[in-house]
Amino acid sequence: MRAALWLLALFGVAVAAALFAGNNQGTVTLFWPPYRVDLSLNMVVLALVLGFATLYAALRALAALLELPHQARHWRLQQKERAMHAALLDALTQLLAGRFLRSRKAALAALEQEQALDKAGAPAPQGPQLRALAHMVAAETSHALQDRAQRETHLQQALHTVAPRRSAHIQELHEGAQMRAARWSLDDREADAALERLGNLPQGAARRTLALRIKLKATRLAGRTRESLDTARLLGKHRAFSADAARSIVRGLAMELINNAHDSSQLQATWQSFEATDRAMPELAIHAAQRLARLGGSAQQVRQWLLPVWQQMVDQPDSLAEQHALKLINALESGLDDIDAAWLARIESAQQTNPRDTRL
């Protein structure tokens, strides 16, 4: 549609020019004593148009000639920028392929290209991000090559590059570098250093699934069972594990806390610090009761902890695993000497309800 309109406009201009030139009897006379020159008005108009076009073309050609050095410089800078991006992509590719020496070499090449652009007065867009990413790739490859000195050097340079920035992307890159550094410390079996890195993260970043996973491993390595348990609960709420896996991890950490109790009062305080969902686990309640009995706790307290598990076994016999049921019976048998009337009534009622249950 637009082309048709332009074509109609062109025809209109051609018709107008033909009408103007065909019926134009005007004459332009130039006096240059003792000479006189008579020219047709059409010739003068045509000469003016051609002169303007020639002058315009000459000026454009001169401007293009003067612009050649700038275009050549722009082309060289563009080539350097492309080489920088290509080197960074190659570094990431080689890192994924497990070729760590080649990856570090490509990352260093990307850094050289970025520095060359900066010195030339044409810094690359997102220069700090590119520089920090290249340093992090070099640090990652150095970690894989067990070159700790180079790893720390590149890590500090990456953190220094993004530290003073306040944009959202730079902040996320800084947080990612801290998390990666915490992971490296964890690989080096330096739990305190990993926890220190995680402690430098903002509150929102520290509650991300990746940070919580690292914290869980670091606290377990450092022997901080209480923190490990709290972290495992958070990971379970974030659905970082399946329900069964989260339950198993929480149960294992809770049992470790129970085993670390050295007297009955400490064990009771530990038990009360557990959440209701934790205390409702049959295997955990049985283990805590057995531990309390070994530490010389009162038999009445032991039976009180075992009461929910007993009710579950009586009401839903198939819901409790056989091994847990046997542990429950053994724990109750150890305190039959001073069992009270209420428990005797419960046992008799259970025997009458399930007369074929050999465990009763």
Image (tube, rainbow, N blue to C red):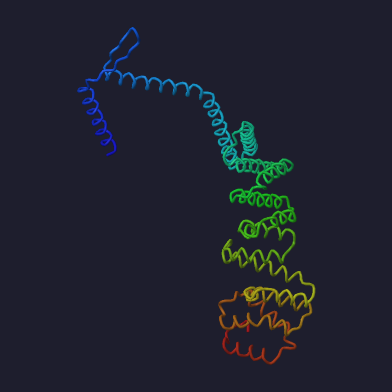
Q: Does residue 170 appear in this view? A: yes
280 in relation to 159, above or below:
below
Q: Position of residue 237 (x, y in %)?
A: 59, 66
The quarter of the rendered structure image containing the N terminus is top left
- Where 73 sits versus 314, above or below? above
Residue situated in front as seen by the camera: 319 or 231: 231
Residue pictured at 67% horizontal, 81% vertical: 306
Question: Would you identify the image quadrant in which residue 35 lies?
Answer: top left
Examine the image and state in which quarter residue 120 appears. Answer: top right
Residue 88, x across and y down, in percent: 59, 38
Q: Position of residue 291 (x, y in %)?
A: 74, 75
> Does residue 105 show up?
no
Q: Quadrant of the C terminus?
A: bottom right
Using residue 40 as the reference point, say whether residue 318 is left or right of it: right
Relative image position of residue 352 (x, y in whole percent)? 58, 90
Residue at horizontal 20 percent and vertical 23 percent from the top: 23
* Count of all numbered marks drawn on residues in the image: 0
**Depth order, front residue of 171/285:** 171
- Going by the picture, which residue comes out furthest to the top? 34
Toward the front, the furthest residue is 33
Q: Is residue 52 toward the left or the right of residue 168 in the image?
A: left
Of 316 and 166, nearer the camera is 166
Task: Name the residue nearer the viewer: 258 or 109.
Answer: 109
